[in-house]
Image (spheres, rainbow, N blue to C red):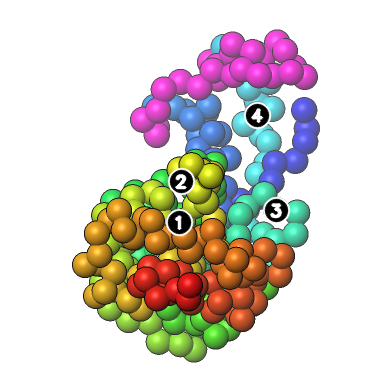
Amino acid sequence: MGLPIPPIFLIENETGILELIDGLQRTSSVLQFLDHEAIDQPELVLEGCDFIRGLNGKTMKTIDTVTRLKIKRTPIRATIINRSGDAFVKYELFKRLNTGGSLLSAQEIRNCSSRMVGGGAEFYELLQSLAQVESFVTATARLPATMVEQRANEELVLRFFALMNSRDTFKGNIEEWLDGYMEDILFERSEFDHDAMTSLFERTFAVISTKLGDQAFTRFNSHGEATGRLAPAYYEAVCVAFVERYDELRSIAAEDLLSRLQSAFESEGFKNATGPGANTIAKLQQRIQVVQEHLSDEAPA
């Protein structure tokens, strides 16, 4: 059709090899169509070609010669970011290229941009690894699949770390808060103990999933049944409560904890801290306190 193909982005690694950091779907689709055997994939058959219907059912081998040559000669623009130079400049460059009208989620952009900073890949791969921990997967099972595809589960891991280490910088724009926290780690403005934080994360979600299953971060209906998807404000309050009162809460029976959690979520104090204007430090601290008091059976009568 002659329409331009969005550019791909590559970054030069320490050995001079170019690594693809954005454009995997575009690149793999082209490769599979041109030479599926080279990437060990089945032959790609065109379908859904609404404008040029004659292409439906065709493969690279069965399309006419003129079209085949046109496809081979179609350029795909590539932006290559050199490894040398200021890491922060490269990080900011990529982030700005992929914001404003981009279809990438905030966490997808963090995944790519973090890899431009020395040690960034290691940090992001930790987020990816912890997002696959069985207890975390169980506890966050109410996160919609479409959001998981956009790395919302990895963002929840990052949010956990931010709650533990940078709660005092919490602000209304969650995206900026998480960006700022991750940048502080990547550019070594803040310390991050990988082993200690991994241990804290794993033990916290081991208890949450064992005691509450997938009911820890969601609303309950009038019959006391968990309903709806994972709510980030609920996630924040429950995670902090289990970290700060870990020894106490892990010894409480699961049915008692669930009943107390329902009571917390139904309380006026929690509702006031999760409604409009909830993304302030004061409201965050309020909902954390409400959940802690109810789970510890200390809530005022």
Write the start and end of the magenta stretch as one range: 38-61
Tell me the quarter of the image containing the N terminus: top right
Q: Is residue 43 magenta?
A: yes
Marks 4 and 2 sit apart, C-alpha to C-alpha, by: 58 Å
272 vs 301, nearest the viewer: 301
Residue at left 50%, top 82%? 166
- Report the residue marked by disc 4: 71
- Report the residue marked by disc 1: 262
The numbered mark, 4 or 3, whose residue comes first in the sequence reads 4
Prevalent SS, magenta region: loop
Q: Secondary structure at mark 3?
A: loop
Three-letter code, disc 1: Gln
- Report the residue marked by disc 2: 224
Q: Is 51 placed above or below 118 here?
A: above
Q: Is 55 placed above or below 147 here?
A: above
Residue at left 66%, top 34%? 73
Three-letter code, disc 2: Gly
Marks 4 and 3 sit apart, C-alpha to C-alpha, by: 26 Å
Marks 3 and 1 sit apart, C-alpha to C-alpha, by: 39 Å
Marks 4 and 1 sit apart, C-alpha to C-alpha, by: 59 Å
Three-letter code, disc 4: Ile
